[in-house]
Image (cartoon, rainbow, N blue to C red):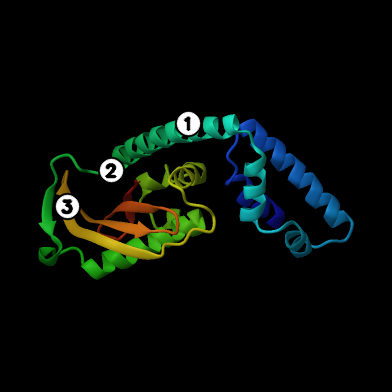
Amino acid sequence: MEYKKYIQQITKRLECSKEKRLEITKDLTMDILAAEENGETLEDIKKRMGSAIDIAAEFNSNFSEEERKKYKKRRKRKKILSILSVLAVFLFVGFYWVIPESIPIEKSKNFKEEEIVKQAENTIDLIESGNYTKLQENADQKVKKVLKAEIIDQVKSDLGLTVDSKVQSFGNRYVAEVRQMGKNYGVIQLNASYENTSITYTILFDKDMKLAGLYLK
């Protein structure tokens, strides 16, 4: 339901413990459902309560300094563990960097740079928008098995992306073909700038331009 998305936009920005976040989620849900029973629409409720950013900021300003410090410490530790675990997962499913044979993209007979760039930008758009169903459709069989919404959402959150984040500009990029274990892949690494963070995407495609590997840092 739409109200759940609104609440999620708030709670994702809260600098507090998981228990406190669940408590606030429960309170917000009860408040919104009660308001809807009294005839208010969700749009009316949003106008009255304010934007998710403003509500989260108000909650955060009322949290104790100790609560915020603990949150930042847990977030930092979680970010490191999450990045390492996701890297390990995608290495397992075929992110072949162990002594690959690299071929300059201009000499590739299997890939065109513009196609790789276009498909990479489409992949990033699907990640940002949360369209994981389409993302899975564009992936090979091995990657489909690990493209779970909860994993991607956690990595996005750890890297500073929210449900509203959209790339503002792309920076340097590297495109090439790599050959490993008898298979050929088109690979692209590009930097994406957001309002409050920047992310380096490394994306691998097979000959059918199916997603064969993904790494965010």
Give the residue displayed 18% in from the left and 58% down from the top: 176
**Mark 2 vs mark 1, CA separation in Å:** 32 Å
Q: Quadrant of the N terminus?
A: bottom right
Using the rendered view, name the quadrant where residue 36 is placed: bottom right
Q: Are marks 3 and 1 in contact (CB under 8 Å)?
A: no
- Circle 1 residues within 10 Å: few <14, some 14–19, many ≥20: few
**Mark 3 vs mark 2, CA separation in Å:** 12 Å
Which numbered disc covers residue 49?
Answer: none
| Mark before the other along the chain sequence, 3 or 1 | 1
Q: Position of residue 98 (x, y in %)?
A: 17, 39
- The residue under label 1 is 73
Q: Residue furthest right?
A: 38
Give the residue displayed 58% in from the left and 46% down from the top: 12
- Circle 2 residues within 10 Å: few <14, some 14–19, many ≥20: some
Tag in front: 3 or 1 = 1
Q: Which amino acid is tagged 1? A: Lys
Could you tell whether 157 is left or right of 187 in the image? right
Q: Which amino acid is tagged 2? A: Gly
In the depicted structure, whether residue 79 falls above or below residue 213: above
154 and 209: which one is in front?
Answer: 154
In the depicted structure, whether residue 166 falls above or below residue 140: below
Q: Are marks 2 and 1 in contact (CB under 8 Å)?
A: no
Tag in front: 2 or 1 = 1
Give the residue displayed 31% in from the left and 50% down from the top: 212
| Mark before the other along the chain sequence, 2 or 1 | 1
Could you tell whether 196 is left or right of 44 in the image? left
- The residue under label 3 is 178
User: Helix, strand or loop at disc 2?
Assistant: loop
Would you say residue 134 is visible in this rendering? no
- The residue under label 2 is 94
- Circle 3 residues within 10 Å: few <14, some 14–19, many ≥20: many
